[in-house]
Structure formats: C-alpha cells, structure tokens
Amino acid sequence: MDSLNGFRSNEETFSDQYNRVIELLQRKKDSPHVKLCTMQFLEEALHYVINCHRENPSRHLFCTSELTVITIEMLPLFAIPNPELMIMQFRQIIEEELRQCFLCVKVFHAEQKQLYQRYVKVYTNEKENADKFFTNLKKWIKSRVRGELEMIKLNLEQVDPLELIRLENFPNSVVTTTAFLEVLLDPMLLISLNNLFVDILLHFKADESFKLTCYYLPGVFVVALHEKAEVRNWARLSLQGMTKPLDMKEFQSCNFTSSIQAILQKLKGLDNPPDKASIQFILTKDLAEAWKGVKLILSVMDQNTILRSFFERDLNIILILCDFLQSFSNIKEPIFIEILGCLEILIDKFGFQFWYNISYPTIPFFQSLFTARSSIRTNSSSSKKLDGIFIKFLLKLRQIIPNRDIKPLEETASEETIMMTILAENQNVIEDIYIECHSSSYLVDNSRLNLQLRGLLWSNVIIDMFEGLILFDEYYAEKNVRLLKCIHKIILMDMIETGRHLDKDLLAFFNDSLTKLQKLMNRFLKKLYEKDSRIIASVLPIHEISPSLVHFLFSTNGSFMIECITLLKKLYPMNTYVEWVQQCTTPIIEGILDILNTFVKWTDIGCDTFKLAGSIQQLLLNVFSPTIFGDKGILKNHSLSQDIVLLIFRYWKGLWHTFTHVFKKYDDLVFATVHREVITQVSSYAEFAIAILKQHSTPVFSTIDPEDLTHPCYQTLKYIIGLLECNNRDLIKRLLQLTCDILYVLTKYKLTIENTLYVKLMRVSNESESYLNGEERNDLHIALSKHVSNEHLIGLMCEDNESSYMDTSSSSNHFTEPIKEYKKSIKLGNEKKKKVYKKVRFA
C-alpha cells in the first residue's frame, strides 16, 4: 500500500475525480478477484473522500448518497494492520462523523450488513477471510461505542442533575453523542454493553418526559422486555409516544426482524436452559411483563411489518402462544391477561384475515384459550379485571367471525349484554353443525371454519356462564331462562357415530361440544336440586322455563329426563305432572310443538331421529296426552277459552304434520328398513291426534276453516295406503285402525274423501292378495261405506297416478265452493246448510 502514501494534486476537478473513482469502483465489482483493480480503487477513493471532507466537512461520507457508495467499499481499509497516515485520517473522519450524525450511523449499519452479504456471495472461496474481516469490524464498532458511552457517562456524572430535567433532543445534545442511539439501532451491542447503557439511562430517571419519539429502533423493542423495570418502562413510554405505526419502509431501513425473532426465541424457551445458538439478550423472567412488552410492540406495528416478523415459519407468535398455554396446567391471571391483549391487537389489525395467518389449527388454539380461562376461574376467585378483559376479548372475537346476523355493540356494553348477544347470534350454530354432519354435502374450508368458530364461541360462552352459575351460585331468573332457551334444542341431539361423514374435524368438534354441554347441564340441574324449593321457584320462573323443561324430558339422554323429573318432584311433590301441567298448560304445549317441528326438520334433512321419535312417543303416550287430553285430563269437561282452542288445534295439526311428513319422507320404506319400529312410533302421533279430535272436535271444527282441516287427514290416508300393502302384521293392524278412525271421524262431520282416494282404499279392501285378513278388509269396507263415490272411475283413472290426487288446484273449487255456500247459509239462517255440507269432498 505504499502507493497510497502522500496526496494527489488538485489539478483535477472534484467532478473528474468522482467520475474516475466511480469508474474504478465498477471495474472492481466487475473483477472482484483482480487485486490490482481493488488497489487502484482504494487509492483513488482515499484521496477523493479526504479532499471532499476538507472542502466541505458537512458533506458526511455516509449520509451523502453519492459518497455512500464509495465509502462503504472502503471499509476493508479498517483491516490493514499498522495503517499509514492517510488511512488513519480516513478512520478519524469516519469516527467523528459517526459520533456526530445519527443518520450516518443508520446508513453505516445498514450498508455494512449488505456489504457482508455481497462479499459472502462473491468471495465464496474466501468466506473465512470475509468472516474474519467483518468479525474484526464488529469488534471495532463495539470498542468505538463503548468508548463513546463511557465518555457520555463521565459527562453526565459531571452535570448538575437539575440541568438534566427538561433536557431536550436527547441524545443529540451538547452533553451526549449518538452512541446511545447506536446501541438501540444495533441491539446486539446490548449483550456486552448492557450495564453501561443502563447506567446512562438511569441518569435521566428524574425527567419523566424523557423518551424517544422520533425514531423506531430495534433496540427499543428489546429494551421493552428488559430485566430492569425502569428500563422497560422507559422503552414502553417511548413506544407509546410514537405518532405513527412502524411501516415497511422504516422497518426495512433497520434490522427489526432479527431483534423480534430473538425476542420470540427467548419467549419460546423462557423456562428452558438457554440455547447457545440463540441471542442472549438480558430479558425479564416475569412472564406477564414479557408478554406485556410483546403486546406493546405489536401495537406500534402495521399489518405488513407484523407479518414480516411475527409470523415466520419457525418462530410464529401463535405457535409460541399455543405451546405456552398448553404447557401450563394452571396459568396465572396476569399472564393470561397480557396474552389476551396480544390477541386483541392482532384481531384489530388483521380482522377476518387473522384466521388465515395464524399458521396453526384454529379450533385447538382458541379452545386452549377458553380452557385456560376456565382453569383460572376454577382454581381461584376470578378478578373483575380478568372478567372485563375477557369479555372485551370476546367482543373483538365476535366481530371477526362471519355471521350475517351480527349487530354492532358498544364497547361500553355490559358483560352480560355482550355474552347474551353472542349466544343469541349463534344459538343455532350447533344445530347447523349437527345437520351438516348428517348431510351428504362437503363444506368448503371457509364455511367449515365459519361453523366451527361460531360453534366454539357459542359453546364456550355458554359453558363459561353456566360454570359461573354453578361455581359462584350467581342465580338470576332472567339469565337462567335465557341460557336454557339457548341450549334446550341441543338437549334433543344424540352423539353422531364417527366415520359417517367426510368432515372428521367438524364431526369431532360437534361430539366434543355436545359431551361438554351435556355434562355441564347435568351438573347445573344437580346443583339446582340442592337448593330449597322456594329458591328453585324464584330462579326458575316455571311458566317461562317450562318449554325448556319439556325439551329435557324429551331428550334422548336418559340422565336429563331423570334430573328434570327429580327437579319437578321437588317443585310439585304431591302429583308432579298433573300439578305442573295444570299450572303451565300453554307453555308445555308450546314446548311440545317446538320439539315436533324440530323433529320434522331434522328428519327431512336426513338426520338419524330414531331415538328422538321413540322419546316423543313415550312421553306423549304416558305423560302429556293422558294428562292433558285423556278421559281424566285437565281439559276434560272444561269450558275452553279461545286461546286454548287455538292451541289445541295447533297441537292437533302439529301431530298430523309430524306423522304425514315422516311417512311422506320415507314412503319408499327406506326408513322402515333401517328402523322398522319408527313407523309404529310415528303412527302413534296420528292416534293421539284422533283422540284429540274425538274429544275436542266441536271447538276445532267451529273455529278452523275446514279447508285447513282437510290437508293433514287427506295426506295421512294417502301415505297409509302404501304401507297397508306391507307384510308387517303389527304395522298393518295399527294403520288399519287409524284409517278406520279417520274415516269415521270424517263421517261424523258429514265429510267425504275425494273419489281417487276412495277408489284406492276400496281396492285395498277388495284385493284378496293384500295382507289384510278378511275381518280387516270388512272393517275397512264398512268405514268406506259412508264415503261412496258418486262417479264411475275405471281403467287408467284407477291407476296409482299420484298426480291424480296431488293436484290441489283441481280440488280446490270442488271443496271451497260448498264451504263458501255453507258460510253464507249461516249468515242467512238457511236451513239447507246440512245438504250443502254433505257434498263437501276432501281434497
């Protein structure tokens, strides 16, 4: 390097010198392994930058763009042992400018990292030399910064503490240098300079307003998790004072990723022995404080920078959170609060896209959150702070779960309002999952995620609320009623056999949720039974709760029936069912109607409702039909109000509808092949309807338009015809009796069936090949004798052409015109009304 000695003449202009240096730089890059090219560039560049500094010291070598590209390539001069005068001058210029200008510091650190990456690619055979050079360069940086910090500390110790109060523009003041910021820019320096850094920072403890508000620096993120509380608080105040989020441009200007990944690595193994390969920052061991720092870091970043640094494949914040939650059987409340805070921020920033970025099975992760919450509530008296924060988290979670019925809620809404709103919005989602698991369709990912998330939110909220009632005896009548209404339909469901459906995850989620809810309800009912009967009556208003209690009685899970009966016996010890039904007739019938509608819906979709059909039959046969409509029933020989009359008709029609709908759905005997008993069970519903009609026919016929009456009876006979031709003797006997009963009731009110249906039934009664015996054919023939057809229907018109009796448009006039004439005759007092009514045909 002897040729570098001395100074160049100033005959060339700065422009000429610049062009020549750039030309040599390009030649060096084109021929990186030609030593002469490197030497020529360094010689020319050294003269040029020193002359530039002499000419204009304010044009710094790193923060002046045209000089930066040259200066960064001159860093190898720092590796020369025993440097000569000109090289020493160059070093002094660099050190002085780095001491005075933080922009130079930022450019220097960014450029030297890029230089290293380029050297490793270019000098592949000399990587060891490149590594050695940059290792020495880092040592020089550390030595330089240490010296600067020691000078800062010395200066601060000599300054009157009162002068430090309201010190502005720290650290770019007369007292300090940029070395303090450089530590925050390159937080790796903190590993060896931590104590010196902390000593300097604590000198400013008296000034509460002292904080950084101009720059986002990676080291501030690290210091936000520092082991010393004073240092952590300073960093957090600085972050909170930022006026705009950290965007991608600023993020890329500094090495934020490595700092954040180091923090996540530390969190991942916070309770494990340190990994030699990991960066050993001196961070707090207080888990709550650690997650609090992460929460604050997330709050000042935008969506892109969070994705870039917190959702890396190996170090993903959600993976770490999930492992963290699952590794603690009894997580402490302050830690859980900070974790919820982190998730709230992520939800705020990502919205619905959050579900596609968490890189972890969604349902297990969020279930672990609710499990942790439940663990805290079970093992200690949950603080109001946690309750409030958890409710706020649920409010945010609700906002990013797709649900068309969602309505905006104020953040100031009460906890109970939020919880009840979530339940109301999602109370049908478990039923949706139940139906989906029985259907033949296969949900797309988005729809499945929608169902699972809404189901998870609903089931966990209701579990949380019921556990609150069970654990803390928080019994409130209104809450109890609303909670039971949100769950009573699920009580009717049965576990689904695994393997029936392609969507195993959804199936497993449903069965798991159902098991938890059923166990919880049993606990709730048992706990309630322990109370005094007066307390039970006060917290379970019987009129409002009766529809739900009916669902418990009809449940396919026998334990619910037992618990419900036990509870009712405590309320009505003398004559349980009669007393209860007498007091709550209307809500009980409403509950039964709701169950019948649910049964029809599930059966129609294809759900396995065999057990539910049997449960309905047994309860109607043994409890409700005799208690309400039997010979000794509460409605026997009583004058009935208009409301009760309408309710009776609705109940009567509901039974017909259930019976005919099931027969229509399974008239090909598929259902009877799988569960033959269900035909017998469901046919009993029609028997109950006939019994009601016999006892309460007058109010029903006088109140309801006969056109409404005809449809269920007509449809029932239609579907019975097909089953009368089966070979099941028990079924034939039951259905034949039902057919005759219907025909006799119609005859009693002078109503006749339409011709096509008449012909079909007559054919069954006359066929020697049918499974009816002689006595049964005779019974059917006698019942039909009052419905003699007045038309000669032969040939094709007698074929089983369903359209011949399903065309309601053709039969409408045949039925409605006499009805209109009959109603008119009532007004006019016409004595001929019976003749008109006789001509009415069922269609």
Image (tube, rainbow, N blue to C red):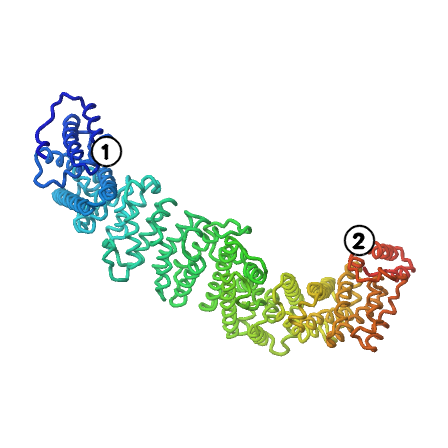
Outermost top residue: 11
State which quarter of the image contains the N terminus: top left
What amino acid does circle 2 point to? Ser
223 sits to left or right of 422: left
Whether residue 168 can be seen here:
no
| Residue position marked by numbered label 1 in the rendering | 69
- Dot 1 alpha-carbon crowd within 10 angstroms: few under 14, some 14 to 19, many 20 or more: some
Task: Return the residue nearer the eye: 806 or 835.
Answer: 806
Of the image marks 2 and 1, the number of the one nearer the N terminus: 1
Whether residue 395 sits left or right of residue 65 in the image: it is: right
Residue depicted at 40% across the width and 63% down the height: 372
Residue at left offset 28%, top offset 56%: 266
The Cα–Cα distance between marks 2 and 1, rounded to whole angstroms, is: 90 Å
The mark lying in front, picked from 2 and 1, is 1
519 vs 143, nearest the viewer: 143
Q: For numbered disc 1, what is the local secondary structure?
A: helix
Residue 663: image location, x then y, percent? 71, 66
Q: Position of residue 496 (x, y in %)?
A: 55, 67
Mark 2 secondary-structure assignment: helix
> Looking at the image, can residue 374 be seen?
yes
- Three-letter amino acid code at disc 1? Val
Q: Which residue is mark 2?
A: 809
